[in-house]
């Protein structure tokens, strides 16, 4: 679909997706770990 | 607003808000991506116009994040409210991420359009400085063991660094830059076609909602970790 400059467009989208997915995963895991740790201590 | 400065009240509000904000962000991303890949190529930029739909929202979110971090730092510094310090600290890694994404996507747009990935002009350099401010803020928090002192030092850095926000904003007016001038949020209306404005604003909203979702979750995590540390201290060695 994207011919000219496709490399630049797709690289920009994939890097953004990777950054966002990593941030979401780390944030969700961090909260789950914090909740589990607190439950254990209670 | 002050009502929710209480950590317990904040947790109940945040727990209720996060699923809605996250769902809204996901829906806006789906709509924004659909719209962004449906628009015709720009007559000058060609297909690279699609990079604008992720570059501009990332840059706006990065600046908004710094504004929120500096605002929370001011509240923490003046009223010594620990939740404000927590909020400021939680915003920093997210802001750094969006700044990095803004820089990388901007470079990937610049190479085919300007013929170079990077140029030391006012806008790009001040935006790179924003990344260093975020990283410096995170490093400062981690370098000082005493949390109260760390929060105070980091808050001062955040407030001093806030002077960079108007520099980023007006750099394209103050200096001759390769980066184009203000073309969207300007008096007299946007210079770009409405065809491109819809995907751009939809993606900007998606990024904003995502930032608030992750920010609230990170504040929650820090509150829970503090409670766990308090319990461990109360139990003794």
Image (cartoon, coloured by chain):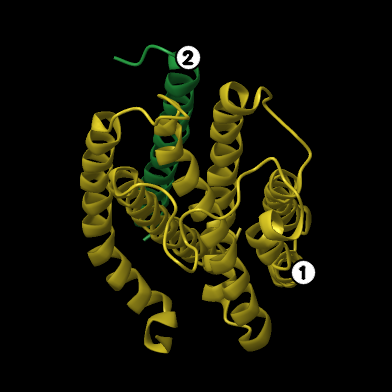
Chain colours: A green, B yellow
Q: Position of residue B179 (x, y in %)?
A: 64, 43
Same chain letter for marks 1 and 2: no
Along the line of sight, the residue nearer the viewer: B152 or B44: B44
Q: Residues within 10 Å of mark 2 (few under 14, many from 20)?
A: few
Along the line of sight, the residue nearer the viewer: B15 or B21: B21
Drawn side of residue B108 relative to residue B194, left or right: right
Quick check: B225 above or below B203? below
Q: Position of residue B28 (x, y in %)?
A: 25, 47
User: Which chain is mark 1 on?
Assistant: B
Along the line of sight, the residue nearer the viewer: B108 or B185: B185
Q: Which residue is at 48% across, 33% downward?
A: A19
Residue B224, numbered label: none
Q: Secondary structure at mark 1?
A: helix
Q: Position of residue B33 (x, y in %)?
A: 28, 35
User: Which chain is mark 2 on?
Assistant: A
Drawn side of residue B119 relative to residue B1, left or right: right
Residue B160, numbered label: 1
Q: Which residue is mark 2?
A: A7
Q: Which is more foreground, mark 1 or mark 2?
A: 2
Q: Position of residue B210 (x, y in %)?
A: 36, 51
Q: Secondary structure at mark 2?
A: helix
Check the picture and name the quadrant holding the C terminus of chain A: bottom left
Gap between marks 1 and 2, in whole Å?
Answer: 39 Å
């Amino acid at each position: 679909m994207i011919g000219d400059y496709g490399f630049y467009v797709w690289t920009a989208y994939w890097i953004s997706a990777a950054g966002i997915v990593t941030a979401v995963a780390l944030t969700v895991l961090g909260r789950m770990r914090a909740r589990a740790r607190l439950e254990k201590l209670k | 607003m002050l009502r929710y400065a209480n950590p317990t009240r904040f947790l109940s509000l945040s727990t209720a808000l996060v699923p809605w904000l996250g769902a809204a962000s996901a829906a806006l991303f789906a709509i924004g991506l659909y719209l962004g890949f449906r628009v015709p190529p720009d007559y000058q930029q060609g297909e690279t116009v699609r990079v604008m739909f992720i570059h501009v929202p990332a840059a706006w979110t990065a600046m908004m994040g710094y504004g929120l971090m500096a605002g929370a730092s001011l509240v923490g510094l003046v009223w010594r409210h620990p939740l404000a310090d927590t909020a400021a600290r939680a915003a920093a890694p997210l802001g750094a991420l969006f700044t990095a994404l803004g820089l990388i996507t901007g470079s990937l747009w610049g190479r085919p359009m300007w013929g170079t990935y990077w140029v030391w002009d006012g806008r790009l350099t001040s935006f790179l400085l924003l990344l260093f401010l975020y990283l410096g803020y995170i490093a400062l928090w981690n370098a000082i063991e005493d949390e109260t002192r760390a929060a105070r030092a980091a808050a001062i850095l955040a407030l001093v660094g806030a002077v960079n926000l108007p520099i980023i904003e007006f750099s394209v007016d103050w200096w001759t830059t390769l980066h184009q001038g203000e073309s969207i949020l300007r008096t007299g209306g946007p210079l770009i076609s409405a065809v491109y404005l819809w995907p751009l604003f939809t993606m900007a909203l998606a990024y904003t909602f995502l930032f608030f979702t992750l920010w609230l979750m990170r504040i929650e995590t820090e509150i829970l970790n503090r409670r766990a540390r308090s319990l461990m201290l109360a139990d003794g060695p």
